[in-house]
Image (cartoon, rainbow, N blue to C red):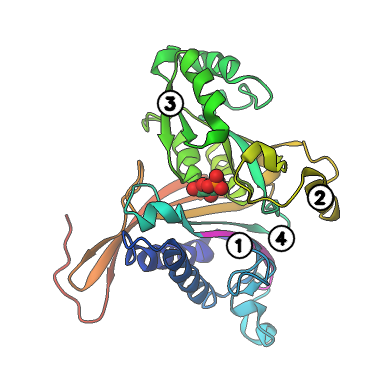
Amino acid sequence: MENTLGLEIIEVVEQAAIASARLMGKGDKNEADRVAVEAMRERMNKIHMRGRIVIGEGERDDAPMLFIGEEVGICSQPNAADVCTIDELLEIDIAVDPCEGTNLCAYGQPGSMAVLAISEKGGLFAAPDFYMKKLAAPPAAKGKVDIDKSATENLKILSECLDLPIDELVVVVMKRERHNELIAEIRAAGARVALISDGDVGAAINCGFAGTNIHALMGIGAAPEGVISAAALRCLGAHFQGQLIYDPAVVKTGLIGESKEANIERLKSMGITDPDKVYTAEELACGENVLFAGTGITSGNIMDGVRFFKGGARTHTLVISSQSKTARFVDTIHMVGQPQTVNLH
Ligand code: VTB
């Protein structure tokens, strides 16, 4: 799966990031998202693959493009058998977030990315559009920290696993009312808190690499993006756990249905009978082959954002593969139209 598809997938996230980056700082998050979705879909449909969107922009009714269930790629077309090889005809599942951190992009803040994860059919958890309590931590703490433990206990475990005093640990938490107690607990335990306004996928991935000065992600973000984070962290051998949050009173955003009871029913109709189950990275991204790709829209801790120059743009992409066990940083110069001076710095 990886060799040819891996290369083309890079272009999918690159094109989405370039499209969004043109709208960086314009204050219009919906437009920044829309152009990324369009660019991602257009590039995907030129790939010899038979893809199905399992995590996308929403249900078909409210998402005209990259909706859940949408088939993408040349090999999902009716004439596929004539133009595709047997390997290319194998179904693959795709989870996308063309502009993760739309607010960050719209307001020119660091950390927005175009991201996706791919696996063979059934290899990615089709998370409902609910919230997810998340715990991400570096490989050394994998399976040792536990989302069911308190933040205080987890910080002690992290400190031992990383051989760092608690007061040197940095935990990323999204600045939300629902996290006020969590933030107070982390501080009381002696660790430092890095508050972010949006973009917890980037924060989770930072936990997978040493040297980012980010040691954990705690708190509640969106569930679909949790699966994309899990895919990346699974490939990196890092820790990720997620638990669906379906109670509107817990998230306090008014964005997940009218009642807890109705949401439990919705989960049941999707085949989720234990709504409180804690999922590991390996359960959220269970495929044998899992591939993650993300391109910086605005600069983050490990990836530069899109930089435009006369006649082109330069992008920075991270591709992580469970098959080849690689985390590859791809630095690409895109020449548009007449080649101009290519700026290497
Ligand atoms: C967003 C976004 C995150 O979660 O905030 C969202 O920035 C949900 O939280 O990156 P709110 O509804 O409270 O804003 C993420 O999308 C991803 O988990």
Which dot marks residue 193? 3
Q: What residue is at 59 percent from the left and 27 percent from the top?
A: 142
Q: Point out residue 331 in the picture as x, y percentages from the top left corner.
A: 31, 56
Mark 1 sits on what residue?
56
Mark 4 or mark 1: which comes first in sequence?
A: 1
Question: Is 92 part of what is drawn in magenta?
Answer: yes
Cβ atoms under marks 3 and 1 closer than 8 Å: no
Residue that carries the numbered disc 4 in the rendered image:
121
Image-quadrant location for residue 336: bottom left
Residue highlighted by disc 2: 262
Q: Residues within 10 Å of mark 3 (few under 14, many from 20)?
A: many
Q: CA distance from mark 4 to mark 1?
A: 15 Å
Could you say where residue 314 lies in the image, as x and y percent from the top left?
A: 28, 62
Q: Of discs 3 and 1, which sits in the foreground?
A: 3
Q: Which numbered disc flags the more N-terminal residue, 2 or 1?
A: 1
Q: Secondary structure at mark 1?
A: loop
The amino acid at mark 1 is Gly
Q: CA distance from mark 2 to mark 4?
A: 29 Å
> Mark 3 is on which residue type?
Val
Circle count = 4
